[in-house]
Amino acid sequence: MRLFFCFISLLILNLFEAKLQAQDLVFSQFFPSQTYMNPALTGFFEGQIRANAGFRTQWGNIDQGFRSYLLNVDGKLFESQLKGDYFGVGFLATRDEQTKAITQHNLKLNLSFTKKLGSEESPHFLSIGFYAGPIERTLNRSLTAPEDPSEFSNTERNIATDFGFGLNYQVMFYEKANLYAGFSVDHLLPINLNATSGNTTSINRRMNAHLSIKYRTAPRIYVIPAAFASFQSNSYQVNPSLLGQFELNRNEWQRIVLTAGLQSRFTSQNIDAFTLISRIEYASFFLGMSYDINVSELNTKTGGAGSFETHIGYIGKISKKIKDVLPCPNYKSF
């Protein structure tokens, strides 16, 4: 089987010749931010409707650091009528605060379609997704031009429309494993936000990829190697992870699942951080928490401060059928 491998980028914020290179926000936890990393994963869950929210804080001891927020609602349409195929539709909103100087809002409408392939014993699913929506960036001029703030208004707001698409392929191996891999492109069309000061905010195209394999090692125990990667401009970032999962209760409506593991982050410059990840799932609810431990030279410059991230969500199921024993590890999660 061909391994799916690629690169992930973390954009670097800098000013050069009156051009501002924008930085996209990055989440360490992939499971609750699936629709953010790939629109083809809209509706990609066991249920009919999903709602989740996330918060991330990074280097809070440096001028308030970076704060990121995520809100997602998505669901499936026509799954029973299409006999396994389905449409996914969702709404995604993010807010990214980069110290006190820059704030960025993204609103996305995600649409996807999933086609069921293969046999009932080993079904395959191919998904394609698209998104469209506005990007707004606000620049605090009183912080970026303190030498003569009277020349500018206190804030500059710039708005543009963003587009992207993605593909996802899932294979379910009955009784043993579930694999899915995907590719997506953010900022499909070039984005240039002209500011009143003459500067230009440019957001370069970003290519992402992800891979997850969920393998059953015992009746209630799974091992999940996974990776998310991206390439943007001249930078890349790769996030491999290894998680372990244990089902305390397999009854669908009182299901209790514990997940924990370690993730590392490699950038184009160095090994950046190690992340401790934990998640608990109870019935239709889940709560995830993680902490990034910096191991690069930023660890000294930031006083050892890392990044804390938490996500909470709900996956609703319309069907009231209760399954005491699940036939295969078909949960669509890292």
Image (tube, helix red, strand yellow):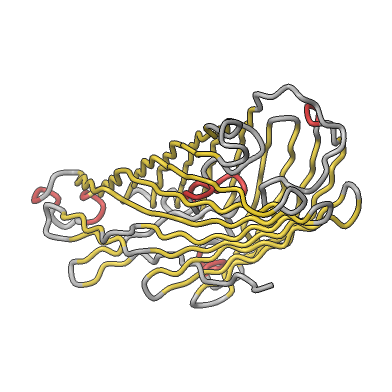
In the rendered image, residue 6, in percent from the top left (x then y), is placed at 54, 71
Identify the residue at horizontal 57%, vertical 66% (top origin).
Answer: 299
In the rendered image, residue 173, in percent from the top left (x then y), is placed at 77, 56
Q: Is residue 273 above or below residue 159?
A: below
Identify the residue at horizontal 47%, vertical 41% (top origin).
Answer: 69
94, 208: nearer the viewer: 208
Q: Quadrant of the N terminus?
A: bottom right
To which quarter of the image does residue 312 belong?
top right
Residue farthest toward the left in the current orientation of the protein:
151
221, 129: nearer the viewer: 129
Identify the residue at horizontal 35%, vertical 64% (top origin).
Answer: 205
Identify the residue at horizontal 50%, vertical 67% (top origin).
Answer: 8
Relative side of 99 to 146, left or right: right
In the rendered image, residue 179, in percent from the top left (x then y), is placed at 69, 58
In the rendered image, residue 195, in percent from the top left (x then y), is placed at 16, 53
266, 176: nearer the viewer: 176
How many tags in the picture? Answer: 0
Relative side of 28 to 257, left or right: left
